[in-house]
Amino acid sequence: MNIPQIELDEVDRRILNILQNNAALNNAELAQAVHVSPPTCLRRVKRLSESGIIARQVAIVSPEMVGARLTAIVEITLDVQAAERMEEFEAHVAGDEAVLQCYRVSPGPDFVLVVQVADMPAYNTLAHRLFATRTNVRNVKTYFSTLRSKFETRIAV
C-alpha cells in the first residue's frame, strides 16, 4: 500500500501538536496559539483533515468514570490464517464496542486486542461472544491490566 506523504512545515507541526493536546480549541484560539491568521489556520486544518493526517477529533473518556474499569490485552491465534479467515475474524471483533484496538501482529499470535469492560463477568461474556463461539480460534491468552501508568494518544510530529 503506497500512502502519499504530505509535506508538513513548521506551522502544520505546531497545529498538530496543539490539537493533539486540546482539540476543543476554536479556530481563533488555535490561530493565535500557532501565530497565523484565522483564515490561514482554518485552511491548514482543513488540508490536514482532508489529507487524512488528522484522522478525526474525539473526546477521550475516563474508563473508570463510566464504569469500564477492566482493561484486557488479548492475544488470539487462529487455526487457519488464510486471508479471508483473517479478515472474517478481524471484522467480527472490530464490530464489538468493547474492542478498542485490534492489531494483526507477527511473529507470535495472529491478533492482539485491547478491550475495555466493566469487570470480570463482563470480560467472560465478551470472551464467550468473541472467541469461544468461533471455530477458527485456536488459542486465547489474556493479560489483565493492574495499573495503567501511561496512556497517550499523542504522536510526536
Image (cartoon, helix red, strand yellow):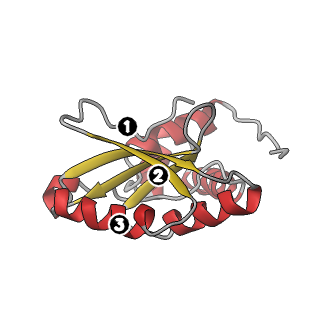
What residue sits 28% from the left and 67% below the top?
125
Mark with earlier residue (3, 1): 3
What residue sits 50% from the left and 63% below the top?
93
Report whether 31 appears left or right of 2: left
Foreground: disc 3 or disc 1? 3
Give the class, few, some or many, for how many residues have Cα within 10 Å of label 3's Cα (few <14, many ≥20). Answer: few
Dividing the image into 4 quarters, which one contains the C terminus? Answer: top right
Query: Which disc is residue 101 wearing?
Result: 2
- 122 versus 5 height, above or below: below
Image marks 2 and 3: residues in contact by CB distance under 8 Å:
no
Three-letter amino acid code of the residue under disc 2: Gln
Give the class, few, some or many, for how many residues have Cα within 10 Å of label 1's Cα (few <14, many ≥20). Answer: few
Three-letter amino acid code of the residue under disc 3: His
Report whether 8 appears left or right of 74: right
x and y percent of residue 91 in the render? Answer: 59, 67
Helix, strand or loop at label 2? It is: strand
x and y percent of residue 5 in the render? Answer: 79, 39
* Rendered image quadrant of residue 68: bottom left
Marks 3/1: CA distance?
Answer: 30 Å
Query: Which disc is residue 152 wearing?
Result: 1
Q: Which residue was labeled with disc 3?
A: 128
What residue sits 52% from the left and 29% below the top?
156
Mark with earlier residue (2, 3): 2
Marks 1/2: CA distance?
Answer: 14 Å
Q: Nearer the viewer, residue 109 or 50?
A: 109
Report whether 3 appears left or right of 21: right
* Rendered image quadrant of residue 42: bottom right
What residue sits 21% from the left and 51% below the top?
70
Q: Nearer the viewer, residue 106 or 9?
A: 106
